[in-house]
Image (cartoon, rainbow, N blue to C red):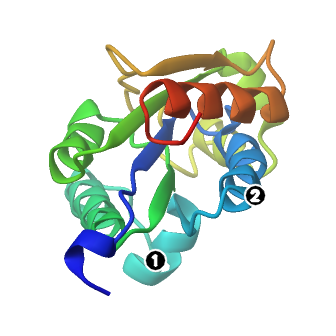
C-alpha cells in the first residue's frame, strides 16, 4: 500500500467525567463507522491502563505519561489509515490538545453530564472509592476536570441517548467532510 492509497483517517476524542456516557456512545458509534467501511480502533483508557500502568497511581506524572502515550498510539494508528476513537476522560485540556497537535483530522466531543448523575450511574465504583477516601484523584471530586473550551460538539447524556449521540457525531463528521455525505 502506497502512502497516497492510505485512506484519510481521523480521530474522535470523547471526553467527560467518569460515568458520563463516553463508553456507551463509543459502543454505538464504532459499528456505525465500521458499517461505512472504516477500520476503527477504540483506545479506551481502562483497557490501555492494564497495559501501560497495570498498577495505576493516577499521579500527575503518571497521567501525563499515560495520556501522551495514548495520544501517540492514536496518532500512529491514524497515520496508517485507522479511525481512532479515544474513550478517555483526559481530565486536563493539555492531554487532548497534545493529541490534536499530533493528529491533523481530530474531533473533540464533550460528553456532558452533571456530577451527581455520573455518581448515580457509576458501575465501577470510582466515585464511591473517591468519597470513601480509597482514591484521592477522581476527576470531578478531588481532581479538576477541564471541559473542552470549544468542542466540535457537546452531547448532554441526560437528554440524548447513546444511539442518537452516535448519529449526531456522524452528521458532524459528514459536515467536516471526514465521511462521505
Decide which of 156, 134 is in the foreground and name it.
Answer: 156
Q: Is 178 drawn above or below residue 148 in the view shown?
A: below
- In the image, is residue 41 above or below residue 177? below
Res. 140 visible in picture: no
Residue occupied by mark 1: 55
Viewer-side label of 1, 2: 2
Q: Secondary structure at mark 1?
A: loop
Residue located at (47% from left, 59% from top): 84
Side (left or right) of 102 relative to 174? left
Look at 27% across and 31% down and name the residue there: 93
Residue holding disc 2 = 31
Q: Quadrant of residue 64?
A: bottom left
Q: Is residue 9 left or right of residue 41?
A: left
Query: 103 or 134, which lies in front?
Result: 103
Residue 106 can be seen, yes or no: yes
175, 23: nearer the viewer: 175
Quadrant (top left, top right, bottom left, bottom right) of the N terminus: bottom left
In the image, residue 64 sits, relative to residue 50, either above or below, namely above
Comparing 96 with 5, the one in front is 5
Residue at left 31%, top 63%? 66
How far apart marks 1 and 2 lie (CA) works out to 31 Å
Q: Position of residue 134 (x, y in %)?
A: 58, 52
List x then y, in percent, for residue 85: 51, 54
Q: Is residue 79 left or right of residue 140?
A: left
Q: Are marks 1 and 2 in contact (CB under 8 Å)?
A: no
Q: In the picture, residue 9 is in which quadrant?
A: bottom left
Measured as percent of width and height from the top left, residue 79 is found at 27, 67
Q: Residues within 10 Å of mark 2 (few under 14, many from 20)?
A: some
Amino acid at each position: 500500500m502506497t502512502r497516497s492509497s492510505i485512506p484519510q483517517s481521523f480521530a474522535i476524542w470523547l471526553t467527560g467525567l467518569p460515568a458520563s456516557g463516553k463508553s456507551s456512545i463509543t459502543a454505538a458509534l464504532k459499528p456505525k463507522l465500521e458499517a461505512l467501511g472504516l477500520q476503527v480502533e477504540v483506545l479506551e483508557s481502562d483497557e490501555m491502563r492494564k497495559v501501560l500502568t497495570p498498577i495505576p497511581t493516577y499521579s500527575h506524572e503518571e497521567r501525563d505519561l499515560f495520556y501522551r502515550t495514548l495520544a501517540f498510539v492514536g496518532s500512529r494508528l491514524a497515520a496508517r489509515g485507522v479511525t481512532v476513537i479515544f474513550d478517555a476522560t483526559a481530565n486536563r485540556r493539555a492531554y487532548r490538545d497534545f493529541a490534536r497537535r499530533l493528529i491533523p483530522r481530530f474531533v473533540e466531543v464533550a460528553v456532558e453530564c452533571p456530577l451527581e448523575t455520573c455518581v448515580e450511574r457509576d458501575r465501577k465504583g470510582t466515585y464511591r472509592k473517591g468519597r470513601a477516601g480509597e482514591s484521592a484523584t477522581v476527576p470531578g471530586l478531588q481532581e479538576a476536570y477541564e471541559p473542552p473550551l470549544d468542542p466540535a460538539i457537546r452531547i448532554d447524556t441526560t437528554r440524548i441517548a447513546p444511539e442518537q449521540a452516535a448519529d449526531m457525531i456522524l452528521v458532524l463528521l459528514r459536515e467536516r467532510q471526514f465521511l462521505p455525505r
